[in-house]
Amino acid sequence: MKYYVGIDIGGTNTKIGVVDADANVFLEQHIKTQSIDGAEKTFTRIWETIVSLSEQLSLDLSNLVGIGMGIPGPVVDNAIVKIAANFSWGNDFNAKQLMEQISGKPVFVENDVRTIALGEKLFGACKRYDNAIVIPIGTGIASGIIVNGKVLSGSSGFAGEFGHIMVNEHGQKCGCGLIGCLETYVSGPGLIREAKAHMLEQRNGLMFTEFQNKLDEFEAYHVFKYAELGDSIANLVLDNFAKHLAYGLGVLVNLLNPEVIVLAGGLAKSAEQIIQRVNQYLPKYALGISLPHLKITKAELADSAGIKGAAALILQHYTAQH
Amino acid sequence: MKYYVGIDIGGTNTKIGVVDADANVFLEQHIKTQSIDGAEKTFTRIWETIVSLSEQLSLDLSNLVGIGMGIPGPVVDNAIVKIAANFSWGNDFNAKQLMEQISGKPVFVENDVRTIALGEKLFGACKRYDNAIVIPIGTGIASGIIVNGKVLSGSSGFAGEFGHIMVNEHGQKCGCGLIGCLETYVSGPGLIREAKAHMLEQRNGLMFTEFQNKLDEFEAYHVFKYAELGDSIANLVLDNFAKHLAYGLGVLVNLLNPEVIVLAGGLAKSAEQIIQRVNQYLPKYALGISLPHLKITKAELADSAGIKGAAALILQHYTAQH
């Protein structure tokens, strides 16, 4: 049987999955990325894991059609990572070439957000839509923009940087160097920072009582949990979060008129709560004519989106031949 | 000789041009749109003008390959105007069908901003670029977004509504019903309103002295003129205009990573002054990584962009056969 491998490389962990032509994941393994040791060592460990997974599945490596890799940072030509954001690899790093040398298999590389969008387009929540936007929200926020059925790269691989729309001129400094980016509010760390600030200022309510002596243990999902329990600080913070997100979605709707917007990433576990609030604010920011046609929903692939989307890079090129 | 007709239908005037396969305009005529009389009368007058222009050029109507029409409002399937914005035609108006009945020729219809973008893509400032954004600034502001060489329509024909990004939550009410849209600042009327407000408040300087007794005669181009003469109110107003535009362009750059942004429309006559100021503010709103690859420039087709772009709708379909 022909098979495929999808790899989702993150700053800390790398997920490796063996899939069939329909992107069904047979077996999946997570390893540490440890990019500090250099790309060659990381990629060699990834390849060794692929060999081991293939053996466990009794699959003959000669039937491995190819490898798809999703990597954070701008990627061009399905090959070159222009800027090493969280990695100790240099800029203009030819990830395709290195992995092809190590594996002897065809390799396609893409930005990780775009692989997630591709996964949702081919196998998940955007399957029936040609104009869609997939928005992973977690440590940061970004967007995979699908236009006429294809994921948009832009002229130099930088398209989709939704998190760096400015929403507050006098806001927080963002990791990117700009001030008041959407990401400084609409992200896990942004949510935690705002919740802590409000708890320390207002010093009341269920959530504050629970965490006043262990603020270090406070996580983003607590905001959603305590908002449901009726805590007023949690509700205020979540409302601000939703308002900022609604502003960003309004921009996307006005510019791109998508059929569907899909929330993905860690915070999408609370997608229902987010969408309900976003829908209250969206009419303030998006043209009314575009809203009846718009659906906002939750990603379908959850954690496997990265693997399936990466595998899809290969599937798109090779399955037509089978 | 085979020939083509491009039509740019505006709220007040309609421009009709006869072009060859390279979109060279042989002859052009402007007539009143008078949509109040109904689409059939307007389209019949347009057709009569086409017949008259053909006669003047001694062109045989049997050689007229087809007609392209640019119309304000969302257009789908190169045929149907979804919403009659400035016209007394109903919604879901099949402009293609009506014009084909009247003329007996193939007709393609598109949103006017997208025809301008298509014109600049095929014959003007975006000729060499596959990822470009054309921004007409005049009575309003909008965008024709070119992605992978094609002008983006969105899922229901509403893409490109750049003017309705919200830039001031407590700002002016916009014609679209939203509050504080970019268009309320970055447009001819917005520029005039802001300049008048500042003149009446500050009551000093060259520009105020000139216009204090004839504010009704004040036009948008005066701001550019007096800014060059060093008038401080004109410079302040133009700076705010540029700052708001830079914010909008920052959003476009972050989301779409275009190679070129082209300023078109009436205010593009002062494109140099606008671009110079926008470039000062853009690094505040756009990711630095995308800026070295970006060119901001002036439209090349000027007033004929609408005609050439509309004709291009037909040219794209038929010239391959010649």
Image: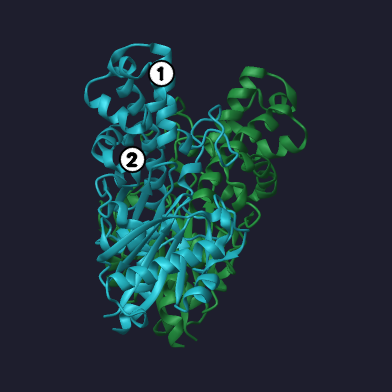
Chain colours: A cyan, B green
Name which residue type carries label 2: Leu
State the image quarter where residue B38 is shown.
Answer: bottom left
Query: What residue is pinned by disc 1?
Result: A198
Q: Earlier in the sequence, mark 2 or mark 1?
A: 1
Residue that badge 2 annotates: A267
Left or right of residue A41: residue A17: left
**Chain that bears disc 2:** A
Q: Residue at x 58, y 68 (%)?
A: B127
**In the rendered view, does A318 fall on the left or right side of B278?**
left
Q: Please tell me how crowded label 2 is: few (under 14), some (14-19), or many (20+) other residues with Cα within 10 Å.
A: many
The residue under the point 40% across, 75% down is A66
> Where is residue A136 drawn, in percent x and y?
38, 47
**Is residue B268 found left or right of A58 in the rendered image?**
right
Q: Amino acid at mark 1?
A: His
Residue B131 visible here: no
- Residue B209 vs residue B82, the one in the foreground: B82
Q: Residue at 38% of width from left, 34% of height from top?
A: B178
Helix, strand or loop at mark 2? helix
